Amino acid sequence: MILTKEQQAILDGEKGETLAKVMKTLVMYGDAFEAEKLVPITSKYNHLVTSFGLKVMSPVYDLMQQLLDAGVASGQKFSVDPRPLDKNVPANFLQNLVFNKFMYTKQDFYEEQLDKLGLMDKNAFTCTCYMDQVGNTPKKGDVLSWAESSAVVYANSVLGARCNRNSGIIDIMGSIVGFVPYFGLLTDEGRKATWVVKIQTTKKPEAQLLGSAIGMKVMEDVPYVVGLDKWIGNELNDSARAYLKDFGAATASNGAVGLYHIANLTPEAVELGEDLVAEGAKEYIIDDAELERVQKNYPVIWKNPDATAKLCFVGCPHLSLDQLKTWTEDIEAGLKKNGKKKVIIRTVLTAAPGVLEAFEKTEYAARLKATGVITSYICPLMYMNNPLCKKMPVITSSNKLRTYTSARYYTDAEILETITGGKNE
């Protein structure tokens, strides 16, 4: 790897031993991926994936403390993934005991470290940091040092920023020195599609299900998706962005996709079209039968597959303001159709704190509360990490939550029917 004089000076310890160690880590990381150089980070803010104060993560807290003791702060303010706890989310005495006495015992301490290191503000805990209400929205072409797979794939694909799928801690190290290794999705060549995915469904495909199918097929490769604009349009409005948020999260968790292109819609696809497709790209055709096949092959890992669901999570990744409003209307309509006043399964809709604040200022907040639905800023995945919660029959419309936990996947329409008392087909 070729370093500039400034980068070499940091590596040689001219700005202190701690920064030298950080730079050495980034150089070793780059060498592992055959990066030719380090390039400057150009985004205003960073995003960190590690938000939870698990007791077993003491090496992380030790590392953060070393940085703080050395007077090292992030070169950027940053947002961070959602908090793992919220007293408003249903949990019994024993579940709460495990949460507070055995799992997230270092949460307050870790949040103090994050604040000292450069946290944007107390509300900057969300996996959807790019929402307007949060304020961490990169510009097209910005070079990032983010972690969190769903945020990275959104930034790359929908915003046209440039970021590799970094791991936790690597994200903050890049932000501290202001450079990241130049390889993969930072390069023009690495952003070319090696798969052409043709959508041939007879109706709008479920975002989470379509993303799952593509992620499992292409894995870490870059897909160029043709035909989806027929269903979601060729304008990146609120509806299209929400769809792509959920679609991308599924490609990133069910596979390892860090970037996708949607013909006639995403920035680079609009600008470059089929020039983004690499020579010899493979083809994957998705029709109704393929999506049905994918969903039917999801494993059900509940102890009793026929159990009645006790809890439902919607919003992994976090919901947008527009989605909260839509879910409110749909739940009201579902309850009316099924002759119910409140949802029959405890249901939690999750969103960023800033989004929830904006939602509370609308008429929809009181209407949703009247249906018995709970809103929260929590990370559903962190909730499900509790071994006592893991045993519960939990349903979700998130393919990410399904992949990483024991939660059972249903489409949005199936979730709606289930929680409002209709028959779940």
Image (spheres, rainbow, N blue to C red):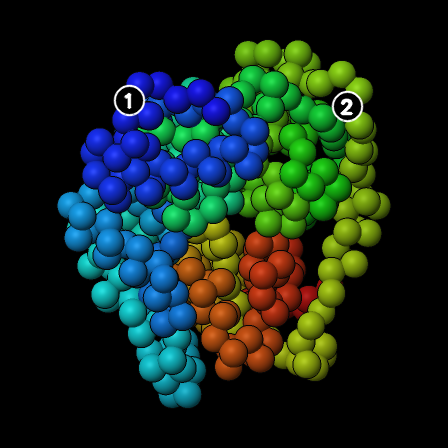
Residue drawn at x 69%, y 41% is 219
The x and y percentages for residue 159 are 45, 27
Q: Nearer the viewer, residue 70 or 121?
A: 70
Horizontally, residue 286 falls left or right of residue 94, namely right
The nearer-to-camera label among 1 and 2 is 1
Q: How many marks?
A: 2
Q: Nearer the viewer, residue 15 or 207?
A: 15
Q: Quadrant of the C terminus?
A: bottom right
Residue drawn at x 62%, y 43% is 256
Q: Amino acid at mark 1?
A: Glu
Horizontally, residue 108 falls left or right of residue 27, namely left
The x and y percentages for residue 357 are 26, 51
Give the mark nearest the N terminus, 1 or 2.
Answer: 1
- Element carrying mark 1: helix
The x and y percentages for residue 135 are 29, 37
Mark yes or no: residue 358 visible: no
- Element carrying mark 2: strand
Tag 2 residue? 281
Residue drawn at x 74%, y 65% is 299
Q: Nearer the viewer, residue 70 or 168?
A: 70
Q: Amino acid at mark 2?
A: Ala
Mark yes or no: residue 425 visible: yes
Horizontally, residue 48 falls left or right of residue 411, namely left
Q: Nearer the viewer, residue 422 or 22?
A: 22
Q: Please tell me the numbered disc located at residue 258.
A: none
Sort mark 2 into few (<14), some (14-19) or many (20+) by Cα contacts within 10 Å: some
215 lies above or below 353: above
Tag 1 residue? 6
